[in-house]
Image (cartoon, rainbow, N blue to C red):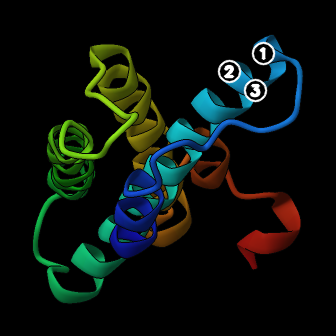
Amino acid sequence: MAAVIFSLSSIPDLRSELPPLWDLVLRKLAHATEYALLAFFVLRAEAAGHHQHHPWALLAGAWLVATLYAITDEWHQSFVPGRGPAVLDVILDSSGALLGALAGWRVTLNPPTKQDAVKRPAEQS
């Protein structure tokens, strides 16, 4: 996923033929989605190798890795003609990373919920 992000960041102009507002909204949603996927995959990789770590540490680690990558990606864009770094993009990327890490945490580690603690009568046998 990081290679995909790096490749897309290397393209000088990613504008589409859509109206400017739609183009902006879709590009910003793409930012959040890319980093959500990155954090999701990082958490899955962390969980596969570090079962002894607390789930919150895995969540924080995945978010931190994705956010740090977002910062370096914006720095990388400062060297691409027609592109430049933007703090708003890091905020969007970091927000997407948090959502992706939370999704990865839920899917991978499946923390118990209140409903899991209360067994149905048919399951108590």
In front: label 2 or label 1 = 1
Q: Which residue is mark 3?
A: 23
Asked if labels 1 and 3 touch by Cβ distance under 8 angstroms, the answer is yes
Judging by the rendered image, the residue that carries numbered circle 1 is 20
| Gap between marks 3 and 1 measured at Cα | 5 Å
Q: Are marks 3 and 2 in contact (CB under 8 Å)?
A: yes
Above or below for 57 versus 45: above
Instruction: Please identify the quadrant where the C terminus is shown.
Output: bottom right
Task: Say which quadrant the N terminus sits in.
Answer: bottom left
- Which residue is tagged 2? 24
Mark 1: few, some, or many residues within 10 Å (few <14, many ≥20)? few
Q: Residue furthest front?
A: 81
Residue 124 against residue 64 in the figure, above or below: below
Disc 1 marks which amino acid?
Answer: Pro
User: Could you say where residue 52 lies in the image, as x and y percent from the top left?
Assistant: 11, 76
Does residue 48 appear in the picture of this structure? Answer: yes
Please provide percent x and percent y for residue 55.
25, 57
Whether label 2 touches label 1, CB < 8 Å: yes
Q: Local crowd at mark 2 within 10 Å, few (<14), some, or many (≥20)?
A: some
- Answer left or right for 22 relative to 15: right
Q: Specify the amino acid type for callout 2.
A: Leu
**Foreground of the two, 26 or 112:** 26
